[in-house]
Image (cartoon, rainbow, N blue to C red):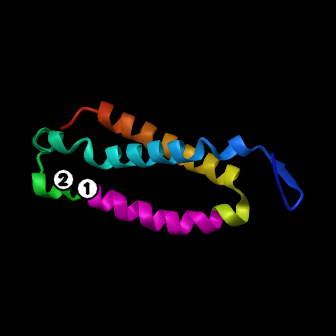
């Protein structure tokens, strides 16, 4: 056990940090590039150009950077748990809205 400034933490507490961050970075990278081979099929299904659809990963990365700069200070001031709960609720709401739109027949 390592003691620093009155806080006692086990040494093994940080042992899983590097593998966890590595897996998180890999999954984030997959989220951006994994669907690139399917761009022609997605573009054909939605009736848009592959070039326009190919700009979507760049837009996702820019949006992620901007939201990271906004949500970071909010998490610092309100706490990480409320920020995570609000973020998960936003993801659930957008996913349910997308599911409803996908289920509606196109005219």
Q: Which residue is disc 2 drawn over?
A: 53
Decide if residue 9 is on the left or right side of residue 107: right
Is 59 part of what is drawn in magenta? yes
Residue in the image at 34% along x and 57% along y: 60
Residue at mark 2 to residue at mark 1: CA–CA distance: 6 Å
Q: Position of residue 14 (x, y in %)?
A: 65, 46
Would you say the magenta stretch is mainly helix, strand or loop?
Answer: helix
* Residue 46 in view (yes/no): no
Is residue 66 placed above or below 30 in the rendered structure?
below
**Residue that label 1 marks:** 56
- With respect to residue 72, does 102 lie above or below? above
Residue range of the region highlighted in magenta in the rendering? 57-74
Quadrant in the picture for the N terminus: top right
Position in image of residue 3 (x %, y %)? 84, 54
Q: If the image is split into quadrants, where does the C terminus sit? A: top left
Q: Nearer the viewer, residue 33 or 59?
A: 33
Direction from residue 95 to residue 10 in the image, left or right: right
Q: Tell me the element at label 1.
A: helix
Q: Position of residue 13 (x, y in %)?
A: 70, 43
């Amino acid at each position: 056990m390592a003691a620093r400034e009155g806080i006692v933490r086990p040494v093994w507490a940080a042992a899983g940090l590097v593998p966890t961050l590595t897996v998180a970075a890999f999954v984030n990278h997959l989220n951006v590039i994994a669907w690139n081979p399917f761009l022609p099929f997605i573009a054909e299904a939605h009736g848009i150009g592959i070039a326009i659809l190919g700009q979507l990963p760049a837009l996702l990365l820019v949006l992620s950077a901007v939201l990271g700069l906004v949500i970071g200070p909010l998490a610092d001031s309100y706490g990480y748990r409320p920020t995570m709960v609000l973020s998960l609720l936003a993801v659930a709401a957008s996913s349910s809205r997308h599911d409803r739109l996908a289920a509606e027949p196109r005219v």
